Amino acid sequence: MTRMNVWVPDELAKRAREAHLNLSALTQAAIAAELARTDTDVWLATLPAPRGITHEAVVTALDDAREEFGA
């Protein structure tokens, strides 16, 4: 595992020590969460633009299909 230095304000470091927080685990979780968030943003950017179909139009189409096919 790679060792890294993380700089935090003195007061935050003091409070973390007093709370006996596992800073390594917290840092790993925060980095993983941020990477997942940015991965999602990148994926969303690859999706086609919305076509302007309203939610109501979709619901109506689904209701019509259910009625037609007996679902």
Image: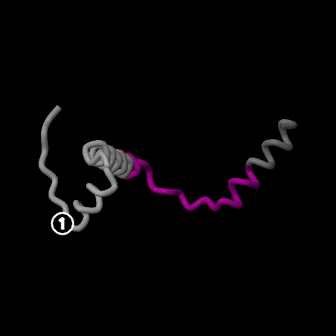
Image quadrant holding the N terminus, namely top left
* SS assignment at label 1: helix
| Residue farthest top in this picture | 1
Q: Is residue 28 magenta?
A: no
Residue range corresponding to the magenta coloring: 43-61
Q: Nearer the viewer, residue 40 or 34?
A: 34
Looking at the image, is 1 positioned above or below residue 12?
A: above
Depicted 10 relative to depicted 43: above or below: below
> Toward the viewer: 26 or 37?
26
Which residue corresponds to the image point at 26% horizontal and 48% vertical from the top-left? Answer: 23
The residue at the point 23 percent across, 68 percent down is 11
Residue 32 lies, in percent from the top left, at 32, 44
Q: Is residue 26 left or right of residue 71?
A: left
Residue 2 occupies quadrant: top left
Q: Viewed as shown, does residue 33 lie left or right of 71?
A: left
Residue 58 belongs to the span the image colors magenta: yes
Q: Where does label 1 land, which residue? A: 10
Q: Is residue 69 left or right of residue 13?
A: right
